[in-house]
Image (cartoon, rainbow, N blue to C red):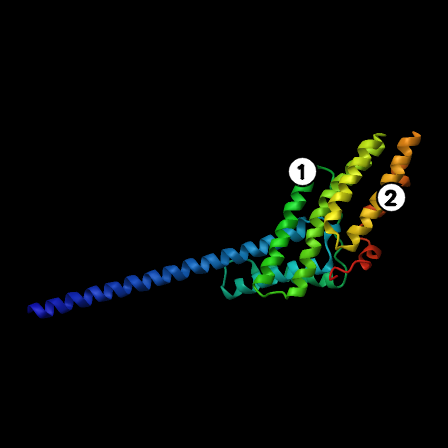
Amino acid sequence: MDTITIVLLLAAIVTVSIVIIIFSQMRERARIERVRKITAQEDGYKRAHRLLSEIPGQYFTADLKLLLIKRMEEACAELTRLKADLPVSNWQESALELKTEIMEKRDARTPVKIDSPEKSTYVKELLQNLFKMVEAMHKSGRIDTATAKKNLKYVLFLVHKTHADLHVFQARDYVRQNEIRKAIHAYHLASTELGKSRDNPLAMKAVKSFRTRIKELEVMDTEGKDTANAESQSKLDREWDTFLHDDEWKKKADYDD
């Protein structure tokens, strides 16, 4: 072969090699991107499922439950499109069944007492994750502004309520121990927490109830009355036990205001 032929042959080999390398790199990038998308959607599904499973039942509204179901369904749809090697069909069936239960008001979730700082902190973290998820759904255009605003406002209120729950539990415990001044202080702390959600009618109703309870306890403390049955006799305590999962309370709230 002459020199020109050899040069052309070598150039062809180099060109083909470059094309093969570029094609391989493109395939690898596509594979990595697909894995990234699958991982992101799987994480999204599991995060929504975890929030739905672990946030105390009394904190949920049907709207919040359905938003989490919506996120789970979106993740499943994307995982199906990506042909992920995951039990997506089972996840879809489970989400659909749960969605039906919620819409038919058959999804009853057990209330959980917030009776320790650790539990309060954990629930607060769950609610903050829920806030971020709703916010992300709005930013990506998956829910409209009105829906996002309504639910974000409510979740923020729940964060404050988590702290109030702990203070109320402590206050009731102090009453049982006849430590009235400590109980009054705990109710003041609960009132301060819910006072941060001044635009929420439920929060303001609770603040008024706390103030009434504080006055009751101040009278007891001043007059030195026996408080053995004070907790069971308190109207506030009975209302607080069903504060969020009582339909009559919920009907009074308009979170769009």
Residue extending furthest toward the left: 2
The amino acid at mark 1 is: Glu
**Residue drawn at the location 63% of the way across and 62% of the way down:** 70
User: Residue 91 versus residue 231: which sits nearer the camera?
Assistant: 231
**Relative height, residue 255 to residue 58 (above, below):** below
Q: Horizontal placement of 51 versus 107: left or right? A: left
Q: Which residue is mark 2?
A: 212
Distance of label 1 from label 2 (alpha carbons): 29 Å
User: Circle 2 sits in a helix, a strand or a loop, which is it?
Assistant: helix
* Left or right relative to 43: residue 208: right
Mark 2 surroundings: few (<14), some (14-19) or many (≥20) residues within 10 A: some
Residue drawn at (35%, 63%) of the image: 26
Quarter of the figure that contains the C terminus: bottom right
- Name the disc covering residue 46, or none: none
Residue at 88% x, 35% y: name it.
218
Looking at the figure, which quarter contains the N terminus?
bottom left
77 over 53 or under it: above or below? below
Mark 1, other Cα within 10 Å: few <14 / some 14–19 / many ≥20: few
Choose the circle earlier in sequence order: 1 or 2. Answer: 1
Give the x, y percent position of residue 167. 76, 39
Q: Is residue 228 above or below residue 13?
A: above
Q: What residue would you read off at disc 1?
A: 118
Residue 237 in sight from this viewpoint: no
Q: What percent of the width, then of the height, locates residue 148?
A: 65, 61
Total numbered circles: 2
> Is residue 166 rendered to the left or right of residue 133?
right
Q: Position of residue 129 (x, y in %)?
A: 61, 51
Q: Is residue 138 visible?
A: yes
Q: Nearer the viewer, residue 175 or 103?
A: 175
